Amino acid sequence: MAEGDGGERRRGRRRWLPAACIPRPGCFTVSADDEGPSGSGAEEEGSRPAPTHLVVTVNGIVGSADDWVYAAKHFIKKHPEDVVVHCSGCNSATRTFHGVDVMGRRLADEVISVVKCRPELKKISFVAHSLGGLIARYAIALLYENETATQTDCNEECEKDVNDARRNQPADRGKIAGLEPMNFITFATPHLGTRSHKQMPLLRGSYRLEKMAFRMSWLAGRSGKHLFLKDIEEEKPPLLLQMVTDYGDLHFISALRSFKRRVAYSNVCGDFIVGWRTSSIRRQHELPKKQDFVDDSKYPHVVYVEKPKAQDVDFSDAMVYQAKTTSEMEEVMLKSLNRIPWERVDVSFKKSRQKIFAHSTIQVKTYFLNSDGADVIFHMIDHFIY
């Protein structure tokens, strides 16, 4: 009987271990080994140190893992010894209509499976486009581990030493999937949703069109409800409001704060899907003026960079429940997200022939149609913390 039980356990183990390492359909991982010359010797391969920094890329609505191929290849080309890029494929095509929470759980599961297969990993970063930024924000809350909560065996003296050390350290330095969080970068992500207030430029600020879009948001499934803040159930605030604080067991804001660097890339113009304010997490009067734009020959489409600065914000979790109107909800999200410093990079394709595709050009989704965004990708890679 015992032998049979042991055999059953062994069979279960054999089934589970390979499953963790089998790539999900549609996703792929790029590393220096993949980019190197074919047929390289085992000796050469063995002498190359394994990269310890995992970069996870996340596509937007109706997108796929292929959307980040250009960026992935250039990451590896510039830093072959440092990074391995995993282009997530668990949320692609119509699966992006399933809701931010469902997709966030899928992404978290996929990241865990990658980390299990690569025990050499020590650091993690996320690079996300459009809706992918919200998916990544949900996923990191699931993957967040507060180091301070696990240290329960310290005696009083040890606890005092730890507390003294923490006073000189940034708050909430937790782990993401057991790894050190480094960069959290979004491209044209609707952090404040797309509900009215010209957050979707395609509607040109028309109240009638925005109202019609609100009613037709069901076309994008549960994701549409989340983006338009329509998912008010059982007196709970909409999901995007929950995601600007530590809500229940999900530490959304603590997970974001744990990253050494947070960057929001946004389109100044030409993006008909996601507006400038919602993607840069700013109020209208906080947007940089045209006369402040810079002309950088190295990154010609990067017109403004705002250095990260923490804001002293009067915020309480109760505000999430009190906000009822669109303006109130937007203000609560702005206040809470700005409690942590963001670097903001404003991009303009106004003089580009590809300006009509700005939403995709900013990430070079397809090189043939979006090649003008290459300098924006290089800007991200050059300023990445490795």
Image (cartoon, rainbow, N blue to C red):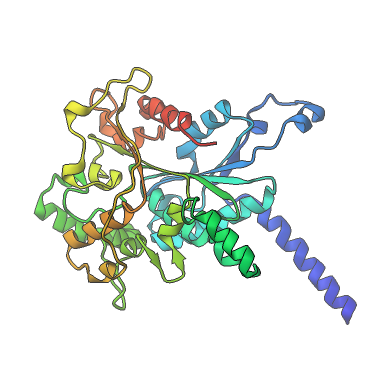
- Closer to the camera, 2 or 256? 256
- Closer to the camera, 279 or 172? 172
Residue at 23 percent of width and 61 percent of height:
329
Q: Quadrant of the C terminus?
A: top right
- In this view, 218 is above or below 90: below
Q: Is residue 111 left or right of residue 252?
A: right
Residue at 85 percent of width and 73 percent of height:
6
- In this view, 287 is above or below 324: above
Q: Is residue 4 left or right of residue 355?
A: right
Of all residues, the one furthest to the bottom in this rendering is: 1
- Closer to the camera, 290 or 363? 290
Q: Quadrant of the N terminus?
A: bottom right
Q: Position of residue 126 (x, y in %)?
A: 48, 45
Residue at 81 percent of width and 28 percent of height:
43
Q: Is residue 23 left or right of residue 142?
A: right
Q: Position of residue 350 (x, y in %)?
A: 23, 27
- In this view, 331 is above or below 127: below
Q: Position of residue 313 (x, y in %)?
A: 27, 56
- The reply to whether residue 28 is in sight is yes
Residue at 29 percent of width and 43 percent of height:
280
- The reply to whether residue 127 is in sight is no
Q: Position of residue 233 (x, y in %)?
A: 31, 74
- Closer to the camera, 383 or 108? 383
Name which quarter of the figure residue 221 lies in. Answer: bottom left
